[in-house]
Amino acid sequence: MFISAKNIFKNYGSTQALSDISFEVNKNELFGFIGPDGAGKTTLFRILTTLLLADKGSATINGWDVVNDFKTIRNNVGYMPGRFSLYQDLSVEENLTFFATIFGTTIEENYDLIRDIYVQIEPFKKRLAGKLSGGMKQKLALSCALIHAPELLVLDEPTTGVDAVSRKEFWEMLRNLRDKGITIIVSTPYMDEASLCDRVALMQNGKIMQIDTPQHIVGEFPRKLYAVRSSNMYSLKDDLLHFPEQHSVHLFGQYLHFTAREREADILGLRHYLEGKNHQNIIIEAIEPGIEDCFIELMTENSASNEN
């Protein structure tokens, strides 16, 4: 097992950031931590990269302990924090040279590893890092994290605030790096990015709710899911919430996603109910769930368990 974390806890004063976190990551795996802001992803990554000490628990990377072997880990891990942390008053080339020098290497020595990424920003190598676009900053930060040929790449919300095209390009780069033998852990608040990982951990309030492949998580969704809309979307959600058989109602784009207490809903009864509430142009369609539907379902179940 390349990464192993066992029973990690971390508090900031009276605020619990991580609660009993345990997981394992295989070598050459692209593993995602999916969850909203405040879920504990950044705190966990800082512990794994030896920048923060856990209150309880243990973690190893390739057999190295994050406390006792922190120097070795720092030499073998590439870390890209959530905020752009390179030197904005240095050029692209100067930033990359600086990070290569820190790790006792050169751009030329590991250029093959970053070539596919760096060629996209090399025409701007004399430009100050602070003058780059969001997508270019992202590529520069990734190049700097890779320049010492790390065994593990740790990326904390690398696509936040980046346009859709750059996000797609970035994930293609990650898959290529994984195929070159680099283990990658990445965090993101974007549920749609979960499907791009080999496995994911769904996190909320400092806890891991589920770990599995995206396909298996979706396949275990316990109920039939329906997309519902009508001419009066404003009142539709409230009316669905008061439907006696409803289990959950959530807004997704132009539709409401609806599940019933039983595995399948009484569609005819639901339609008659909505017609009785004066809804018109009613659409009720059975759909396949996504990771976000699964995440919300897990949150609902956990909330119900905590209340009981």
Image: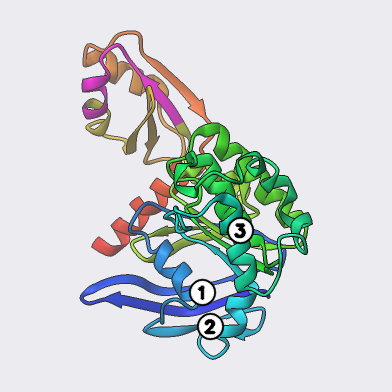
Badge nearest the viewer, 3 or 1: 3
Q: Position of residue 90 (x, y in %)?
A: 50, 55
The residue at 58%/88% (across/down) is 69
Q: Residues within 10 Å of mark 2 (few under 14, many from 20)?
A: many
Relative horizontal placement of residue 99, taking residue 202 as reference (left or right): right
State the residue lying farthest toward the bottom. Answer: 68
Of residues 203 and 65, the one nearer the viewer is 65
Of residues 78 and 213, the one nearer the viewer is 78
What is the C-alpha distance between the residues marked 3 and 1? 24 Å
Q: Secondary structure at mark 1?
A: helix
Q: Secondary structure at mark 2?
A: loop
Q: Position of residue 221 (x, y in %)?
A: 51, 45
Q: Are marks 3 and 1 in contact (CB under 8 Å)?
A: no
Q: Which residue is mark 3?
A: 96
Relative horizontal placement of residue 235, taking residue 26 as reference (left or right): left
The residue at 60%/41% (across/down) is 124
Q: What quarter of the picture does the C terminus occupy?
A: bottom left
The residue at 62%/45% (across/down) is 171
- Could you tell which of marks 3 and 1 lies nearer the N-terminus? 1
Q: Which residue is mark 2?
A: 66
Q: Are marks 1 and 2 in contact (CB under 8 Å)?
A: yes
Magenta-span inclusion, residue 237: yes
Q: Amino acid at mark 1?
A: Leu
State the residue lying farthest toward the front. Answer: 126
